[in-house]
């Protein structure tokens, strides 16, 4: 699962972990091992800005770890870069990060 990971701006980036809700996404990232987590809203935007170099992104919605409120969290569309908050039960895509 992690053979294709890339490093960018001090972060290792995992391959796509699949479609899941925000709660499942947090668990999936932790299961990768020590230090793996959802990117913050700002880190996710950095991944979007470097998506061609990193590779493997779909033109869909990705989760961040940044919560908007108890029921929603920020994510980003990778077709146009628009950041928006969605209900945490919504299924989005997941890329995990950790400090490299």
Image (cartoon, helix red, strand yellow):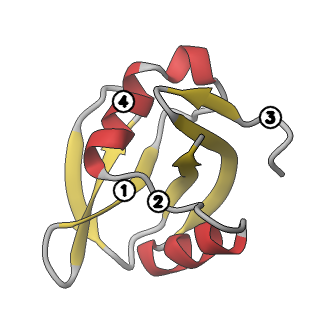
Of pointers 3 and 2, the one earlier in the residue sequence: 3
- Residue 37 is situated, as x and y percent measured from the top left of the image, at 52, 62
Per the model, the C-alpha gap separating discs 4 and 3 is 18 Å
The residue tagged 2 is: 38
CA distance separating discs 2 and 1: 6 Å
Horizontal side of residue 13 vs 81, given as left or right: right
Residue pointed to by mark 3: 4
Q: Which mark is residue 46?
A: 4
Task: Give the mark nearest the N terminus, 2 or 4.
Answer: 2
Q: Residue 69 location in percent, x, y? A: 13, 77
From mark 4 to mark 1, how far is it between C-alphas?
12 Å
**Left of 50 or right of it: where is 55?**
right
Tag 1 or tag 2, which sits nearer the N-term? 2
Q: CA distance from mark 3 to mark 2?
A: 17 Å
| Alpha carbon distance from label 2 to label 4 | 13 Å
**Depth order, front residue of 87/53:** 53
Mark 1 Cα-neighbour bin, 10 Å: few <14, some 14–19, many ≥20: many
Q: Residue at x 67, y 57 (%)?
A: 17
Disc assigned to residue 64: 1
Q: Are marks 3 and 2 in contact (CB under 8 Å)?
A: no
């Amino acid at each position: 699962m992690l053979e294709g990971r890339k490093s960018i701006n001090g972060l290792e980036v995992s391959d796509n972990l699949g479609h899941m809700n925000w709660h499942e996404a947090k668990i999936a990232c932790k299961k990768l091992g020590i230090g793996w987590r959802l990117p913050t809203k700002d880190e996710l935007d950095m991944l979007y800005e470097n998506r061609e170099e990193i590779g493997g992104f779909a033109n869909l919605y990705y989760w961040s770890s940044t919560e908007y409120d108890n029921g929603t969290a920020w994510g980003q569309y990778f077709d146009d870069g628009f950041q928006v908050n969605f209900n945490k039960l919504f299924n989005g895509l997941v890329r995990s990060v950790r400090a490299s």
